[in-house]
Amino acid sequence: MKLALAAFITSALAFGTNAMAAEKPPIVLVHGAFENASVWGHVTAKLEADGYKVVAVDLPGRPGNPAAPDKVSLNLYGDTVVGALTKLNRPAVVVGHSFGGIVIADAAEKAPAKIKTLVFTAAYLPHDGDSLVSMANKDADAKIGPHLQINKEKGIASIEYAARADLFANGAPEGLRKAIPDLILDEPLAPLATPVHVTAGKFGQVDKVYIHTANDQVISPSFQAQMVASTPVRREFTLQTGHTPFLTAPDELAADIEAAAAR
């Protein structure tokens, strides 16, 4: 009898643990410009170890999801994220990095019911009609502008090679600083200049969290604060990193994403 009771209690506890894990929302990770889904590798591993289902999206126009630059659009980016959400069985936490903030805003406008929380990570937090270009032009403290190279004939934007480590890995260990210039990709140009359309009734109603990066050279801390002041969010976190916390502080970033997801 005691053995049977012990087995029942053990089974009940195991069921409870599994039920708690099942309640964790799925997490969709959306990279920014000049990146692909591989940047999320360490964060994905940490989140999965903690019981989350994770999907890292490769936006079109890069090796993991190839497309010619003239075939790529902001609309296609948003649709790609919505497609990933559609495959999940319940609303997800959607994390966008940098330009990915504009992409996840577009996805939220298109499918707000599929999203539990938007987590803007060192990201643009747009108003209706904003684009990466228009928002970057308002960021007086950002350091990236002089190093942005535009090739209209090829339809791509790129970052000056010699500036990449200082822009994307400031404060990082020397090994990462040496590696990161070769990880930065060319970016299809058109989506960067395309205004996003968002409304108060859709995007405006989706729960939002912002993760600030205190030493950012690409989207300045002052502009991050300005965006959050203009579009209030439920909760804010701050990482003492540059623009790529998924490389320089992945465990801390994963912890903040999990805290955002725990609502």
Image (cartoon, rainbow, N blue to C red):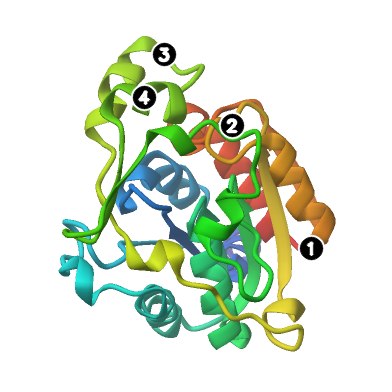
Upstream in sequence: badge 1 or badge 2:
2
Upstream in sequence: badge 4 or badge 2:
4
Between 172 and 26, the residue placed more toward the observer is: 172
**Within 10 Å of the Cα at label 3, are there few (<14), some (14-19), or many (20+) other Cα atoms?**
few
**Within 10 Å of the Cα at label 2, are there few (<14), some (14-19), or many (20+) other Cα atoms?**
many
Above-or-below relation of 171 to 33: above
Upstream in sequence: badge 4 or badge 1:
4
Please state which of the two labelled residues, at mark 4 or mark 1, is closer to the viewer.
4
Tell me how far mark 2 sits from mark 3, CA to CA: 16 Å
Tell me how far mark 1 sits from mark 2, CA to CA: 20 Å
Q: Which residue is mark 2?
A: 216
Circles 2 and 3 in contact, beta carbons < 8 Å: no
**Residue 1 can be seen, yes or no:** no
Upstream in sequence: badge 3 or badge 1:
3
Q: Disc 3 residue type?
A: Pro
Above-or-below relation of 81 to 178: below
Tell me how far mark 3 sits from mark 1, CA to CA: 34 Å
Q: Quadrant of residue 178?
A: top left
Q: Which residue is mark 3?
A: 173
Name the outermost residue toward the top: 174
Q: Secondary structure at mark 1?
A: loop
Q: Residue at x 15, y 68 (%)?
A: 68
Above-or-below relation of 152 to 236: below
Between 261 and 67, the residue placed more toward the observer is: 67
Tell me how far mark 4 sits from mark 1, CA to CA: 31 Å
